[in-house]
Image (tube, grey):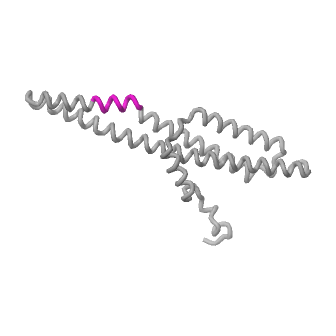
Amino acid sequence: MPETTQPADVERRQSISVELERLEESAKYSAQSQFEQAKRWRVINLWLGVPASGLAAVAGATALVTAAGRVAAGCVALVAAGLGAILTTINASHRMNQAAAAANAYLEIQTAARQAREIDLSSWSIDEARAALAELTARRGEQNKTAEPPSRRAYQRGKANVEGGGQTYAVDEPDAQSGAR
């Protein structure tokens, strides 16, 4: 139990709780935006990679089947090479993995903030609570520095996911609180 129950401590604990809730909310929206960004990069990777591979195979087969198909094979090979060059330049596969890793890091921060607020805060001293808040704030700051900013569309889709209940647990539903299923 907290060492003191002075009005100032109660007020400060409430302020820490509110700030933990802000961290949780921020991490929730950031995670969902990064997941949406990862989906976008996966689609781009597939839309460029599959045709590039297919066209390269067609170009090779055309060149091997007949000498008359050299020009067609060359044109198809050029298109495949162009798609491959775009794919290499934008590095969609790497960006997809980065966005997914960032999303998972934000989920970790979100979970830690929620657990600190709902489970640990009431038993921590003010100094312990403040230290936990500072640590989570630093983690979010580091993650913000390394995560690539999501596109406006990814942010809007992530926001829609959250607001549509995409991060709601069954235990948080009103019926679950009363014990009714």
Asked whether, in this view, residue 12 is left or right of residue 169, the answer is: right
Location of the C terminus by quadrant is bottom right
What residue is shown at x 41% (from left), y 32% (from top)? 90
| Residue 80 in view (yes/no) | yes
Residue, x 73% and y 47% (percent of image)? 19
- Name the residue located 66 percent from the left edge and 70 percent from the top edge: 179
**Would residue 5 be seen by someone viewing this image from the given angle?**
no
Q: Nearer the viewer, residue 87 or 125?
A: 87
> In the figure, residue 166 lies in which quadrant?
bottom right
115 and 161: which is toward the camera: 161
Is 86 covered by the magenta stretch? yes
48 versus 178 height, above or below: above
Residue lying furthest bottom in this view? Answer: 180
Question: Where residue 171 sits: x, y (%)?
Answer: 63, 62
Q: Position of residue 159 (x, y in %)?
A: 55, 51
Q: Is residue 34 above or below residue 67?
A: below
Quadrant assignment, res 40: top left
For the residue pair 125 and 149, the one nearer the viewer reads as: 149
In the image, taking residue 39 as reference, residue 180 lies left or right, namely: right
| Image coords of residue 178 (percent x, y) | 68, 70
Residue 39 spot, x, y in % from top left: 44, 45
Please tell me how many numbered marks the rendered image carries. 0
Q: Is residue 79 found inside the magenta-colored segment of the image?
A: no
Q: What is the chief secondary structure element of the magenta stretch?
A: helix
Magenta stretch bounds = 81-90
